Image (tube, rainbow, N blue to C red):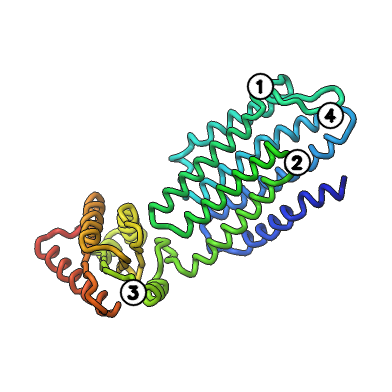
Amino acid sequence: MLKELIEINYATVITLSCLLVFIFTNDYFTKRIRSLFLMACLMLFGLVGADTVEYWCAALDHLTPVRILMSAIGYSLRPMIIYVVIFLLGNLKEKKYHWLALPLVLNTMIAFSAFFTDIAYSYTADNEFVRGPIGYFAFVTSGFYEVVLLICTVKLYKSVRVSESVISGVVACSFVFASIMESVWKFEGVINVSGAVALTFYYLYLNTQQFKRDSLTNVLNRRCFKMDAEKHMEELTAALSVDLNDLKMWNDRYGHDKGDEAICTLVECMERVMKPNCFLYRVGGDEFVVLCFQQDYDAVARLKKDMEAEVAKTPFSCAIGMAYREENEEVGRLCSRADQAMYEEKRNMKASGKTSL
């Protein structure tokens, strides 16, 4: 039996151990992201422990309360792990989506009801497992969270975070297949190893993204802007130059935290209306560039108008300059024309008193 347990859990334990080392030695992520990774990691360790003890108890010729307890913990933890992954990959805020925890609470209550009822599952006197009328509720709960995870994948794709949406989709599918293998084909430890590999893979992905992202706003940085512009020059059709108005005044009057808030608010407004094949880069303190690939003139003009409308809903304001690429025009020239259009708009806004202060 020891050999079987090692075969089932070895990959999961080693992968989770390596992930824990990454979590405790890497301080690039926010406290929230690190906490979510740590929580999922510890839950997976707990699931491995519960499944191991339950597997050992199942080999006995008599029922023990420990087996009931380990089964209840295992059925409770499986959907919990997917729940935490949703907040990681979907970048959801716990306070806003607290209702998502309701199926978890109900599932946990049903799982632990095995101590006094057989509606979920029970055991015969000779230690045989018997599934009750709602014995598949844990798998239904996991399925619900897998659907939510797939919805988050679609939202990521629509918000132009294409590479992250692909990873989210792969993670969601891995959980779906693992759930099917455990519930239908009676595989052991598949969800455990799927969760461990998915978490580690996503952690490493986020870590590599740190070199491409701006630390304050999490949008693509100047280095990435230059690389993308050169690499995809043939598909480049337009550029938008965006500059926040009155950043120095916000900093001087209310402090740099308010200035950071203004920059982040501007980014949130632009990302809400960003179109596929259009990418936002922070190239300076309050300066941003949007590169549009394979977009016609009207689509880019609509994007500019949508961005202006979103920013107008906030206490802040910005100037946006648009330049549509001429035949064989270099990237530098294209962005220079967008800058000129932005500065012209900024002068007009100041002249008409349409700045944020």
Q: Residue at x 24, y 61 (%)?
A: 300
Dot 4 amino acid type? Thr
The residue singled out by tag 3 in the image is 234
Residue 27 in the image: state x and y as whole percent.
56, 63
- In the rendered image, the vertical position of residue 271 relative to residue 242, given as above or below: above
* Mark positioned earlier in the residue sequence (4 or 3): 4
Asked whether, in this view, residue 250 is left or right of residue 112, the answer is left
**Crowdedness near tag 3: few (<14), some (14–19) or many (≥20) residues, C-alpha within 10 Å:** few
The residue singled out by tag 2 in the image is 51
* Mark positioned earlier in the residue sequence (3 or 2): 2
**Crowdedness near tag 2: few (<14), some (14–19) or many (≥20) residues, C-alpha within 10 Å:** many
Residue 294 badge: none
Q: In the displayed image of the protein, which residue is found farthest to the left? A: 352
Which label lies toward us, 1 or 2? 1
Q: Are marks 2 and 4 in contact (CB under 8 Å)?
A: no
User: Could you say whether the residue bearing mark 3 is in a helix, strand or loop?
Assistant: helix
Q: CA distance from mark 4 to mark 3?
A: 68 Å
* Mark positioned earlier in the residue sequence (2 or 4): 2
Residue 21 in the image: state x and y as whole percent.
67, 61
Dot 2 amino acid type? Asp
Residue 64 badge: 4
Which label lies toward us, 1 or 4? 1
The residue singled out by tag 1 in the image is 133
- In the rendered image, the vertical position of residue 182 relative to residue 308, given as above or below: above
Q: CA distance from mark 1 to mark 4?
A: 22 Å
- In the rendered image, the vertical position of residue 97 relative to residue 280, given as above or below: above
Between 232 and 123, the one nearer to me in the picture: 232
User: Could you say whether the residue bearing mark 1 is in a helix, strand or loop?
Assistant: loop
* Numbered marks: total: 4
